[in-house]
Amino acid sequence: MDKLEEMFHLFQARIPETARRIRPEIIRMSELFATCAQAGGVIQLFGVRHGEEFVNELNFRAGGLAPFHAIRPMDMALNGLIEKDCVESGDVFNRADLLSTLLGLYKLDARDLYCIVSAGGNEPLSLALAHEAKANGHVLTAVVNRKTVAKETGETVADLADCILDMGADDPDIATVVQDQSIGQLGSTLANVSAQMITAEMYAWYVRNGLKAPVLLSANNEGADRHNAALTDPYNGRIR
Amino acid sequence: MNTTICAETFQERLLLLLEHLYTSQKENLEKTAQAFADCIARRGVIHIFGTGHSVGLGLDIKGRPGSLVPIHIMDMNDFVFKGGIPLAQFKDKKDIFERQAGVAQKLYDLYAIRPQDIFIVISNSGINGIAIDIAQLARDQGHTVIVVTSMQHTLAEKSRHASGKHLYECADLILDTCGPAGDALLDIDGIQTGPASSLVSMLLLNIVASEAIRVCMQDGYRPYVFQSQNVDGFDNDAIYEHFQGRIKHF
């Protein structure tokens, strides 16, 4: 079997298996997100390394929901506050001292919820953000890879979170082998399926509660800019 | 109002899409994996470009154990980091930077692109100017261009490019994400949600990259693949140096 077929069948098998297993976590996290949004809060997303892909799947996404915002370490580099290399090399996640600089770039609010996306959940910057969120009374959620977290000996964001969603990947996240070479990953794709399941479940929450879901339109659609601005302008710069 | 839509509905529709995806795309996936392998064997780099939510998709096949090394993300942020564009101008909502004339050429010129390199350009709608410009520029320079797009979506939209072309018309190979027009697996009372293009694109790139490694090895060529830093004697930083700035850290 070539790797196309093998990898494809792996995804086909793992997507429904993971979705079934994390169903209660999806429902719980969706309810927390929707409740926060309905109360005027924003879901503040923070992704570590490949966790950024989960963040992108929810943040200002056509067909997604409006009240999300990404806290991005790269914003510090773009603003000239740290070197770009510090972000690209991943060193930034070891720098808990940068938390106030990072958060200082955004309009944050007492009603906001924090969601940290990190396979291991033990980076100093992630932990600093988690502690800051909890100390200030915010709801904290974590998207982690449970098999990775289980190997950690110290504190992780999963220890602090009010709700945890499992990425569902193996540890290490290796899909297959060619000769003696381990190759391929499943984790981010599985996590992004979860992200869209959260979108769908949030939508269901709005409908169940007789509310109109704040669904963003693709900028390619006629009138999308006006529609999206009507959803985002009330946040006065908090979500873009 | 439809009250039965939920997470499971999205998952069920995604699995239906995947069923069709593989059978319809197998041939082009094989050709794309071969193009990757040929590029790698010639010590080339695979440049990946996408805008909007496509911008981060290349990251999934880059920079972690088991992933190919010679992957380079063409990043619009490089206009600020390497191109001297002030952040305020780059982020100006009234004069959207990526829609300005000549932007694609300026981005292209920021990188050390070599003749053996190939390009992946990702846009689900396939109608926006900069993605079409990048693909056309690369083809004009003789590079193989692989486009990831939704044919159903793009054929339903009018191009925003001055030439009237869609992205797929600038491709040597097309990987169709097979998603519906509007990129929504859920349509509830006229409201479209449940976008699938990003995760389908990630899946396609993942399986292509894995097959490319297999093809290389079958052909007797061992490609550079990132290893866990826990593997004795392996130094990922040395690999970056080997490519002399043509690829970046994750």
Image (cartoon, coloured by chain):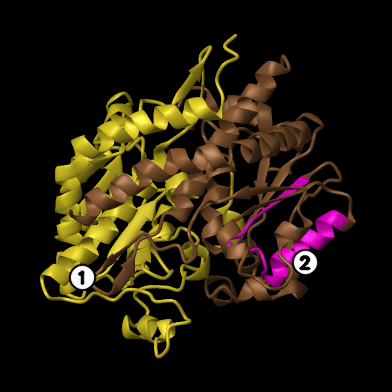
Chain colours: A brown, B yellow
Residue B183 visible in the displayed image: no
Observer-nearest residue: A183 or B248? A183
In the picture, measured across the screen, residue A193 lies left or right of residue A138, that is left
Q: Residues within 10 Å of mark 1 (few under 14, many from 20)?
A: many
Q: Where in the figure is residue A232, as x and y percent of width and height? A: 68, 34
Residue at the far bottom in the pictured view: B233
Residue B101's place in the image compared with B35, above or below, is above
* Amino acid type, residue under disc 2 in the picture: Ala
Q: Which residue does the numbered mark 2 point to in the structure image?
A: A128
Q: Which residues are magenta?
A: A113-134
Q: Which residue does the numbered mark 1 point to in the structure image?
A: B40
Residue A204's place in the image compared with B15, above or below, is above
For mark 1, give the secondary structure: helix
In the picture, measured across the screen, residue A101 lies left or right of residue A223, that is right
Subunit that carries the residue with mark 2: A
Residue A45 visible in the displayed image: yes
What residue do we see at 38% from left, 43% from top? A13
A115 falls in the magenta region: yes
B219 falls in the magenta region: no
In the picture, measured across the screen, residue A60 lies left or right of residue B124, that is right
* Amino acid type, residue under disc 1 in the picture: Ile
Q: Where in the figure is residue A60, as x and y percent of width and height? A: 58, 40
